[in-house]
Amino acid sequence: MHITFHGRDHNCTVEVENGQTIRQTLEVAGILPSTVVVSYDDRILPHSTVLNSDINLLVTTVSSGG
C-alpha cells in the first residue's frame, strides 16, 4: 500500500505492507517518529495506529527548546 506524508517539513510517499504501524512507516520514510505528530482528517493519530489501506497523512513537526 502507498502511504503519503505531507506537511511543511515532509512530502514523500512510501510503499509498505498492510498492517504496518504509523511509527514503522515513518521510519521507512526516514522521519524520526519522536519529532512529529501525525494526523488525518483533523484528528491526531497515535503512532501505534495500524494502517490497512492507501492514505495521505499530515505530518506536523514538533518544536521544542529555548
Image: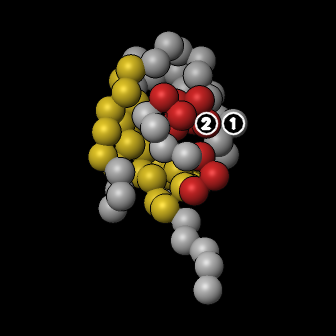
Which amino acid type corresponds to the residue marked 2 in the rendered image? Arg
**Residue pointed to by mark 2:** 23
Judging from the image, what secondary structure is the residue with disc 2 in?
Answer: helix
Which residue is nearer to you in this view: 61 or 40? 61
Determine the image quadrant of residue 19.
Answer: top right
How dense is the environment of label 2, judged by Cα within 10 Å: few (below 14), some, or many (20 and up)? some
The quadrant the N terminus occupies is top left
Judging from the image, what secondary structure is the residue with disc 1 in?
Answer: loop
Where 10 falls versus 15 (above or below)? below
Which residue is at 64% across, 42% downward?
47
Q: Residue lying farthest bottom?
A: 66
User: Does label 2 or label 1 sit earlier along the sequence?
Assistant: 2
Q: Which mark is residue 48?
A: 1
Which amino acid type corresponds to the residue marked 1 in the rendered image? Ser
Where 30 falls versus 63 (above or below)? above
Does the rendering let one see residue 55? no
How dense is the environment of label 1, judged by Cα within 10 Å: few (below 14), some, or many (20 and up)? few
Q: Residue lying farthest front?
A: 66
Which residue is nearer to you in this view: 27 or 60? 27
Q: Position of residue 62 (x, y in %)?
A: 55, 66
The quadrant the C terminus occupies is bottom right
Tell me: 49 left or right of 12.
Answer: right
Determine whether label 2 and label 1 are within 8 Å by CB.
yes
Where 65 falls versus 23 (above or below)? below
Q: Which numbered disc, 2 or 1, marks the residue closer to the eye? A: 2
Which residue is at 55% across, 46% downward?
32
Tell me: 49 left or right of 16.
Answer: right
Does the rendering let one see residue 23? yes
Determine the image quadrant of residue 12.
Answer: top left
- How far, Cα to Cα, is label 2 from label 1? 6 Å
